[in-house]
Image (cartoon, rainbow, N blue to C red):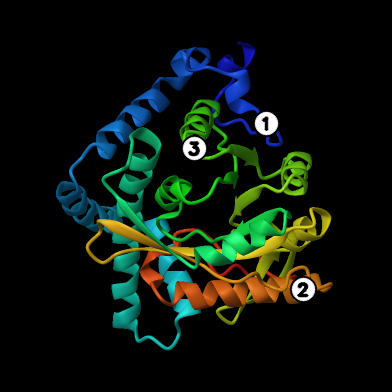
Amino acid sequence: MREASNKPVRRKNQKNSRVTEQHRFRDFLAPVFWPTWLAIAGLYLMAWLPVRVRLLVSRGLAHVLYRLVASRRKVAQTNIRLCFPHLDALAQESLVRAVFYSNTLNYFETALAWCRPNHSMQLEVKGLEHLHRAQATGRGVILLSGHFGPIDIAGSLIVDHVALTFVYRKDDNPLFNYFITRARERYCTATLAHKDMKGILRALKGGATLWYAPDQDYGRETSVFVPFFGVPTATLTMTSKLAKAGNALVVPISGYRRADGRGFVATIEAPLDIPSGDEVSDARAINAWLERRIVEHPEQYLWLHKRFKTRPEGEPSVYN
């Protein structure tokens, strides 16, 4: 197909949720995609490592990445310094190192979710009754999550308990985006691009349960500035808009990896009072909930992301 000749760095069709209907792997055989094919092969190798080896390799690799990837180390250090000012310098640096280990291990777990049946991993789900009660109303459900470490592996395991539609941000590389989408659709009812508003609203109005994680910096235009760990943070108001337009309940779900690295726990809570009629208040409530869940296992959150990249007018970047 014609799109196969496009360079993978180009951003296009971000609203298109029909990726697996429109493409096949054979559409991405051009030489420009060969590095991506090698990366996918690497993911398959990672996915089939025994758990003990996975843990050992993750620890060693995290140590190397901490030293070599200075840009992400500085991002994590800045985020931890801003969000945990009560910790002394030694404790903050220890947390940063733990973040690198947890996020490195998460790559292996994500590869497992994408590349193989994952019956070897266990998931304990708490509070499932909250979701069942919400679904029993016949309304759509926004399963509000965050970028906790085991987001993909937990999503692949929770399908034994609930049918999910996954809302995600498309990858700019069309081959990798197809690979990820196809992998997720093995365990989700459907996948929807986060800019496909028509598709998302159609699903909610049809009573679907959407896994939705809005806790990233999408810029100033669609956000309001509300506190996140005491820092004014560009926070999406889209959760409120979707809940109102789709007549949906907002049910929070969080997850963490057990200390032995061999299983996960997902906790579902009672619906939040969203939409309340005040989008700023709703954004505050979402960030407050995220804070409560993050501090339980702070090393497993995605602190490598520039969560505070967008600043209020006149305020300098915190990452310089």
Residue at (67%, 66%) from the top-left corner? 234
State the separation of the CA atoms marked 3 and 1. Answer: 21 Å
Name the quadrant containing residue 87: bottom left
Which disc, if any, is residue 280? 2
- Residue at horizontal 33%, vertical 34%? 116
Q: Which residue is mark 1?
A: 12
Name the kind of residue labelled 3 in the image.
Arg
Q: Is residue 315 left or right of residue 91?
A: right
Q: Indicate which label's residue lies in the foreground, 3 or 1.
A: 3
Furthest toward the front, the residue is 136
Neighbour tally class for label 3: few under 14, some 14-19, many 20 plus, Cα within 10 Å: many
Which one is closest to the eye, mark 2 or mark 1? 2
The answer to whether 222 appears left or right of 113 in the picture is right
Q: Marks 3 and 2, how far apart in space?
A: 32 Å
Identify residue for label 3: 184
Using the rendered view, name the quadrant where residue 36 is placed.
Answer: top left
Say what amino acid the circle numbered 1 marks: Lys
Residue 309 seen: no
Type of residue at label 2?
Val
